Amino acid sequence: MTLKIYETFASIQGESTRAGILCFFIRLAQCNLRCSYCDTKRAQTLQNSREVTLEELVTQANGSGLELVEITGGEPMMQSPAVCELAKRLIRDGHTVMIETNGSCDLAPLPPEVIRIVDWKTPSSGESGKMFLPNFNSLRPIDEVKFVLSDETDYRFALEKIKQYHLAEQTPNLLFSPAYGVISCEDLVRWMLRDHAPARLNLQIHKCIWGPAREGV
């Protein structure tokens, strides 16, 4: 089995509840959404991809010496079932596996050990109507839901979805991620304090270290 890969690299986990932890990244090519704030546009299509066997990807992950592996994209679930098999093999070899997904695809086929970081696209993305809503009714405490916020409308949308789908009762890992260079982090924190928002501020620390444009870090 093979997957269309944009890049693989070892770095730190830049977001999520595991921010700052060393991690091996497998970034798949191709995405079915075109979010306004996308920061990996070169991975949206297969144009910049290469075909890699699952065996080679597992060898790379094992060779990194890192326990944590994130499968990201693009949208990884566009390459299911091969991506599910990859996750299974990584878990078999002792890795903790996370998948970052745009929320538009069914996550049920994933092995139960996989930690799901599910984006809920906000209005400013232009793609908020394309979520696969059953994903948000079947979260586990290990899963995470991320809202990328560009303005206060996005923020209020996130609060509404947290309440409507009882997200805070399913998982404590709700992430408010300010769109880099678009929204004031100070404003976002002020809103969160005002409303006692049941979420954590989720900064992209890899961009703070290397800047917003650099890839493979």
Image (tube, rainbow, N blue to C red):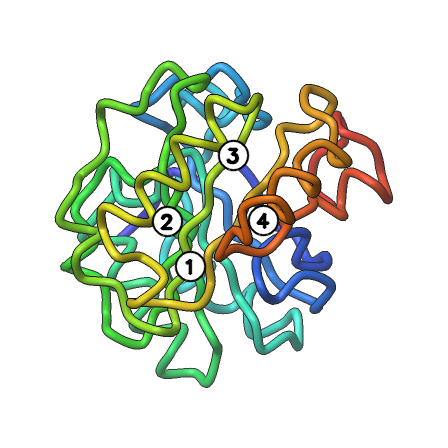
The residue singled out by tag 1 in the image is: 144
Q: Nearer the viewer, mark 2 or mark 4?
A: 2
Q: Quadrant of the C terminus?
A: top right
Q: Secondary structure at mark 2?
A: strand
Label 2: few (<14), some (14–19) or many (≥20) C-alpha neighbours in 10 Å: many
Vertical arrangement, residue 149 with respect to residue 198, above or below: above
- How far separated are the C-alphas under marks 1 and 3? 13 Å
Answer with the quarter of the image where residue 23 lies.
bottom right
Label 1: few (<14), some (14–19) or many (≥20) C-alpha neighbours in 10 Å: many
Q: Secondary structure at mark 4?
A: strand
Q: Nearer the viewer, residue 14 or 151?
A: 151
The residue singled out by tag 4 in the image is: 8
Q: Nearer the viewer, mark 3 or mark 4?
A: 3
The label on residue 160 is none
The residue singled out by tag 2 in the image is: 118
Vertical arrangement, residue 10 with respect to residue 36, above or below: below
Three-letter amino acid code of the residue under disc 2: Val
